[in-house]
Amino acid sequence: MPVVAQSTYRPPFWLPGGHLQTIVPALCRKAPLITREKERIELADGDFLDLQWHRQGREKLVILCHGLEADWQASYIQEMAATLAAAGWDVLAWSYRGCSGEMNRLPRFYHSGATGDLGEVIEHACRSHSATRIDLVGFSLGGNMILKYLGEQGEKGPSRLGRAVTYSVPCDLACSSRALDTAFNREVYMRRFIKSLAEKVRAKHALFPEQMDDTGLDRIRTFREFDDRYTAPLHGFQDAEDYWAQSSSRPFLLQIRIPALLITADNDPFLGPNCYPHREAESSDHFHLEVTHGGGHVGFATSRSQSPWMARRALQFLSASSDSLA
């Protein structure tokens, strides 16, 4: 029953509430760029992905997966990269289609359930790196992708996969979309996400005017509207509801067969009640759930005198003996 009974995370007393614990770390977290070695890989469908490496010939490799509309340079990615590199891992951070600074070649983008792309990155890492063990760490959308991938693979996953740590995962996408569809969240968070996504739609429209209609794009305010119009049809789903149902990781959690940890805050403003999979963790020998008291969404701020808690916690889980994973 791998539910972590008591988390070690404690939010700073001067940073109350889920919104501040989300926004302040996003604005203030700084980290040097560790993964500086760039590689472009060609995908089976003719598109490409850009990877960023930190290689020192270590026997362990960690693959880092960012959140929605971020990239390999995200401060939480590089913070994690620095901690794990110092502890003995080589690091591979990758950017999803259209997130690396150059628009991808095909009409499709990335999305929460795009585990095929993650699979190609893992397969490339297995071919090109001599690590005997490959771990996965993901944040928000990237965490959903990892958990869904691991559940899909089940017993068939690459033999070198070791462990996984994920943070702030919208494992029920419909529930998360409803949580973000409130007046405050639409104004504070959705406005930023939709603005960034709309810029990519316009860039795609310039490349594929027959396949991408940007009429009325400025009127879109919610994920339901965006996913109904763009995400679903571009990626083979019927509509937003179908996309959310097929791409959510929660239905796949019980099929995970390597040690995997989901860390999520009890005050995450991006998540609704179905994004806390207690039942699955209680029923699994492999999937672990840790619900922290406070932390926001990919926030988990610490005082300036402390090392980053997310990175410390990942290192603890990835380094623990098998009988002390929680």
Image (cartoon, rainbow, N blue to C red):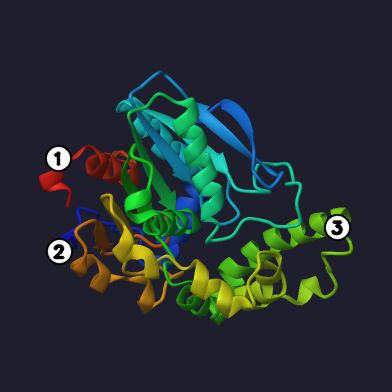
Q: Amino acid at mark 1?
A: Ser
- Residue 2, percent from left and from top: 18, 60
* Corner quadrant of residue 241: bottom right
Residues 270 and 66: in front is 66
Q: Earlier in the sequence, mark 2 or mark 3?
A: 2
Residue 321 circle label: 1
Dot 1 alpha-carbon crowd within 10 angstroms: few under 14, some 14 to 19, many 20 or more: few
| Residue located 44% across and 33% down the image | 126
Left or right of residue 166, residue 32 in this image: right
Residue 208 circle label: 3
- Residue 11, percent from left and from top: 29, 57
- Which residue appears farthest toward the top when viewing the image? 57
Residues 128 and 195: in front is 128
| Residue located 24% across and 73% down the image | 279
Q: Amino acid at mark 2?
A: Met
Give the residue at mark 2. 1
| Residue located 61% across and 73% down the image | 223
Q: Is residue 234 above or below residue 72?
A: below
The reply to whether residue 243 is visible in this rendering is yes
Whole-Å distance between the Cαs marked 2 and 3? 50 Å
Residues 159 and 301: in front is 159
* Corner quadrant of residue 307: top left
Left or right of residue 44, residue 54 in this image: left
Whole-Å distance between the Cαs marked 1 and 2? 17 Å
Q: Which element type, helix, strand or loop, lies under badge 3?
A: loop
* Corner quadrant of residue 62: top left
- Residue 269, percent from left and from top: 44, 70
Q: Which element type, helix, strand or loop, lies under badge 2?
A: loop
